[in-house]
Amino acid sequence: MGLCFPCPGESAPPTPDLEEKRAKLAQAAERRQKEAASRGILDVQSVQEKRKKKEKMEKQIATSGPPPEGGLRWTVS
């Protein structure tokens, strides 16, 4: 297994410029994050919808002001 050098008549293969390399690395990082976020989940969209709905409910509760007398709040889940 020797080293492979380009033939004398051929030029070395072009290396990607820095901008292309950064763009590819950024795309790969985003793809890995998406895959990691959805690992083990069969229906990704339903999970995202539930998460958004939960955040919306929490925000609504936080902005609704102080609870009425008694201080207890009932939630149905």
Image (spheres, rainbow, N blue to C red):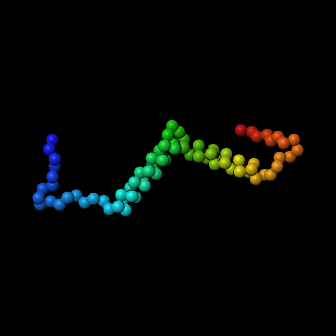
Please give the count of numbered marks on the rendered protein.
0
The image quadrant that residue 10 belongs to is bottom left
**Which one is in front, 4 or 64?**
4
The image quadrant where one finds the N terminus is top left
Q: Position of residue 31 (x, y in %)?
A: 45, 49
The image quadrant that residue 77 belongs to is top right
Q: Position of residue 42 (x, y in %)?
A: 52, 39
The image quadrant that residue 70 belongs to is top right
Q: Position of residue 66 (x, y in %)?
A: 82, 49
Instruction: Tell me which residue sits at (68%, 50%) in the image.
Output: 56
**Which one is in front, 14 or 74?**
14
Q: Where is residue 48 in the image (x, y as percent from the top left)?
A: 59, 46
Task: State left or right for residue 70 relative to residue 54.
Answer: right
Q: Residue furthest right?
A: 69
Task: State left or right for residue 25 relative to residue 77.
Answer: left
Task: State left or right for residue 41 relative to residue 73.
Answer: left
Instruction: Tell me which residue sits at (49%, 47%) in the image.
Output: 34
Q: Is residue 17 above or below residue 39?
A: below
Instruction: Tell me which residue sits at (14%, 44%) in the image.
Output: 2
Task: State left or right for residue 7 relative to residue 24.
Answer: left
Q: Is residue 54 above or below residue 17?
A: above
**Which one is in front, 46 or 51?**
51
Q: Which residue lies furthest to the left in this view?
A: 8
